[in-house]
Image (tube, grey):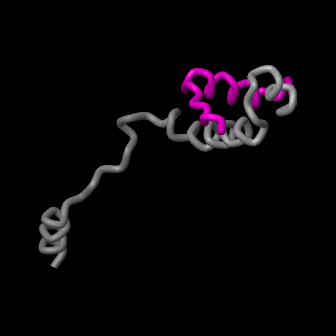
Amino acid sequence: MKKRKNHCPELEAKVAFEAIREEMTLAELSKKYGVHPTQIWTWKRAAIENMATASTCRGATAEQVSAADVDKLHSKIG
């Protein structure tokens, strides 16, 4: 029985980036890097989904309002 391969994150990112660029097919990338095409597709999909979170500003997150602040504001309203 073969041992399961563990790929380093640098390789995953490199292969996913090449898959996103679409200069080579998944089959060609599979032969080049020795990784199954389904795994490349999974890495590509994960990279695309995580691009939105990677490009957001850290200070742009919505602030959490505590329940005490909400009660205080409601008391001011009436």
Residue positioned 60% across, 36% down in the render: 4
Pick the residue in front: 74 or 48.
48
Where is residue 23? Give x, y as percent.
Answer: 85, 24
Pick the residue in front: 53 or 42.
42
Identify the residue at the far bottom of this view: 78
Boundaries of the magenta span: 1-24
Identify the residue at the far front of this view: 1
Instruction: Determine whether 72 is above or below 78 in the image.
Output: above
Q: Quadrant of residue 10?
A: top right
Q: Quick check: 62 left or right of 27? A: left
Where is residue 18? Give x, y as percent.
Answer: 74, 24
Q: Quick check: 63 left or right of 53? A: left
Q: In the image, is residue 10 part of the stretch drawn in magenta?
A: yes
Instruction: Determine whether 76 is above or below 40 in the image.
Output: below
Residue positioned 38% across, 35% down in the render: 58
Q: Quadrant of residue 17?
A: top right
Residue positioned 27% across, 54% down in the render: 64
Instruction: Determine whether 49 is above or below 19 in the image.
Output: below
Please state, as top left, top right, bottom left or bottom right, where the N terminus lies in the image: top right
Residue positioned 39% across, 40% down in the render: 60
Where is residue 68? Give x, y as percent.
Answer: 13, 65
Q: In the image, is residue 19 part of the stretch drawn in magenta?
A: yes
Instruction: Determine whether 41 is above or below 30 in the image.
Output: below
Q: Quick check: 41 left or right of 59? A: right
Pick the residue in front: 11 or 49.
11
